[in-house]
Image (cartoon, helix red, strand yellow):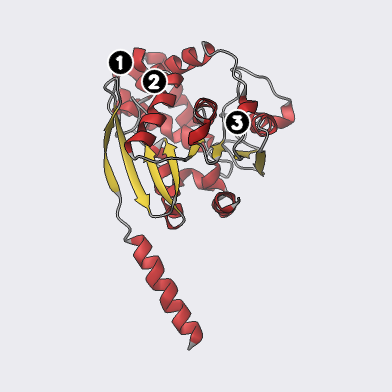
Amino acid sequence: MKTLALLLVLTTTLTAFAAEPVEEGFIETPDGAKLHYSKTGRGSTVLIIPAELYLFEDMAQLGDQATIISYDMRNRGRSARVPLDKVSITNDVRDLETVRHHFNVDRIVPVGYSYLGMMVALYAVEHPQRIERVIQIGPAPMQLDTKYPKELTHGYEDMPVSDEDVARWRAMQASGEIASKPREYCDVDWKLMQFVLVGNAANGPKLKSHCHLETEWPVNLNAHSARLRESREKLPKIDYTKVAAPVLTIHGTHDRNAPYGSGKEWAATFPNGRLLTLEGAAHAAWVDAPDVVFPAIREFLKQK
């Protein structure tokens, strides 16, 4: 009977959490960008997670422990498009502060995926009083084009893509269809990209295509990424050792987008950094190893 009662309590709790509402809306930045956000959860710890389109659905499971606020960066996902001259990593830092201020949160745990791993580190340097702790997932290198030893990088040779899909992708690029047929090209590109992002090919189909969003069409995303790269190149030298808060860096050894060596470098730089190495995982590490990533985040958030 005790076992049955416990099961009933657990079932009720899980059902209640499953019914937890999701608040959605837009936040306008001081320079007029409109950021789409989703919010869920009820914990006192507040995670603010840019890249809503990639992360919110999976990170929402942490809502029983924390409040989850996720948003798409300017010119990405469901956020409004902006002129490219308004795209920069420094504006991304300002937008994170705008989101924090909008929700009137005193201290946050920013979660940065890919190049946003650098962005949240920049935010932590500029706003140390607002940081409780920091999480990076597959962070890009501190310095562009950093070359890491071969054992700290991973190539594209083991991707299970068909010769037919690769040939079609290359033909569309050569013919200029990336611009003339942007949605069709996006669909073809995604057939390859889903396998770039995972270490275990079986996990590729678990990722969702975002080709229904114009912001995510490669013709637009490539221009956006180029502007971000330019803005990163213009950054002054940043002293990341100033980040005193605890930092958890999560990185897969088979990451093709941001080499594993990058994660090791970040974790070694922070005075209170720690590295979670995921053998065989790629850039979407939480998809390759959810049974490791989410318990590790939960434990990190509980630590004093």
The number of numbered badges drawn on the structure is 3
Residue drawn at the location 62% of the way across and 27% of the way down: 242
Circles 1 and 3: CB atoms closer than 8 Å: no
Kind of residue at badge 2? Met
**Which one is earlier in the sequence, the residue at label 1 or at label 2?**
1
The image quadrant that residue 20 belongs to is bottom left
Q: Is residue 87 left or right of residue 244?
A: left
Q: Nearer the viewer, mark 1 or mark 2?
A: 1
> Does dot 1 land on a helix, a strand or a loop?
loop
Q: Nearer the viewer, mark 1 or mark 3?
A: 3
Kind of residue at badge 1? Pro
Where is residue 303 drawn, in percent x and y? 60, 51
User: Which residue lies under the disc numbered 1?
Assistant: 83
Kind of residue at badge 3? Val
Where is residue 56 drawn, in percent x and y? 40, 44
Residue drawn at the location 62% of the way across and 31% of the way down: 157
Q: Which mark is residue 243?
A: 3
Where is residue 136 drawn, in percent x and y? 55, 37
User: Which residue lies under the disc numbered 2?
Assistant: 172
**Which one is earlier in the sequence, the residue at label 1 or at label 3?**
1
Q: Which mark is residue 32?
A: none
Q: Is residue 302 left or right of residue 189?
A: right
Of 84 and 195, which appears nearest the observer? 84
Q: Is residue 215 left or right of residue 122?
A: left
Q: Is residue 152 above or below residue 233?
A: below
Q: Is residue 40 above or below residue 248?
A: below
